[in-house]
Image: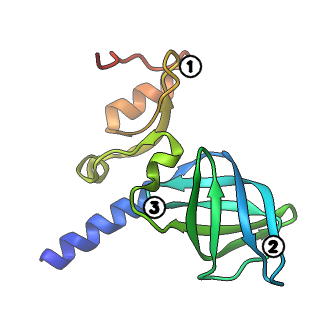
């Protein structure tokens, strides 16, 4: 049962991906071994890494440097899609402490397991962003609110 709980927890962690296009700089070597420094864009982000759209060919298990606020090393997990404007690759942080790179607070696993909807919310005054796990009622309210959601900010 302990292994089952661990697997369920891992699946919930993996599921906390946020679809957001953030500009990133990518430094590395392409499939032909040519060094590059390119501007790219995220497709999704998570506490473990991201999917990025890049106009280069890469190979699994190669290392790149991703630059958002600071440079971090990532490992290419593989190509997910090929599009007319580039390829989408899954990349993972080499150090587990790197999720702070996104300036987004990800919820604890216990909240994620009970969530019906996960969404990225941004505070209009402080501009901080957080992945929020919503229950059925909260999701319903979010769906009906065109002016945004209101919550008391922690003091």
**Label 2 with label 1: CB-CB less than 8 Å:** no
Residue that carries the numbered disc 2 in the rendered image: 35
Query: In the image, is 37 to the left or to the right of 63?
Result: right
Q: Quadrant of the N terminus?
A: bottom left
In the rendered image, residue 91, in percent from the top left (x then y), is placed at 58, 68
Q: Disc 1 on helix, strand or loop? A: loop
Query: In the image, is 19 to the left or to the right of 10?
Result: right
Give the CA separation, mark 2 to mark 1: 46 Å
Query: In the image, is 66 to the left or to the right of 124?
Result: right
In the rendered image, residue 45, in percent from the top left (x then y), is placed at 54, 53
Q: Residues within 10 Å of mark 2 (few under 14, many from 20)?
A: few
Residue that carries the numbered disc 1 in the rendered image: 146
Query: In the image, is 109 to the left or to the right of 1?
Result: right
Disc 2 or 1, which lies upstream in sequence? 2
Q: Quadrant of residue 29?
A: bottom right
* 103 w.r.t. 85: above or below: above
Give the mark toward the camera: 2 or 1.
Answer: 2
Near-viewer residue (22 or 81): 22
Give the mark toward the camera: 3 or 2.
Answer: 2
Q: Residues within 10 Å of mark 1 (few under 14, many from 20)?
A: few
Q: Which mark is residue 36?
A: none
Disc 3 or 2, which lies upstream in sequence? 2
* 33 w.r.t. 91: above or below: below
Disc 3 or 1, which lies upstream in sequence? 3
Q: Give the residue displayed 45% in from the left and 28% down from the top.
A: 142
In the rendered image, residue 17, in percent from the top left (x then y), is placed at 49, 54
Residue that carries the numbered disc 3 in the rendered image: 48
In the rendered image, residue 135, in percent from the top left (x then y), is placed at 31, 38
Q: Give the residue displayed 35% in from the left and 67% down from the top.
A: 11
Q: Give the residue displayed 59% in from the left and 44% down from the top.
A: 69
């Amino acid at each position: 049962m302990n292994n089952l709980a661990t697997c369920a927890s891992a699946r919930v962690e993996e599921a906390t991906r946020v679809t957001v296009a953030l500009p990133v700089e990518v430094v590395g070597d392409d499939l032909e071994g040519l060094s590059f420094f390119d501007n790219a864009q995220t497709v999704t982000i998570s506490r473990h890494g991201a999917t990025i759209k890049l106009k280069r060919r890469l190979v699994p298990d190669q290392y790149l440097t991703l630059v958002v606020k600071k440079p971090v090393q990532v490992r290419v997990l593989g190509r997910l899609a090929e599009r007319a404007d580039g390829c989408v690759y899954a990349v993972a942080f080499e150090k587990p402490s790197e999720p702070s790179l996104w300036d987004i607070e990800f919820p604890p696993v216990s909240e994620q397991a009970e969530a019906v909807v996960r969404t990225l919310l941004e505070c209009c005054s402080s501009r901080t962003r957080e992945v929020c796990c919503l229950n059925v009622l909260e999701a319903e309210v979010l769906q009906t609110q065109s002016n945004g959601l209101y919550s008391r900010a922690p003091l």
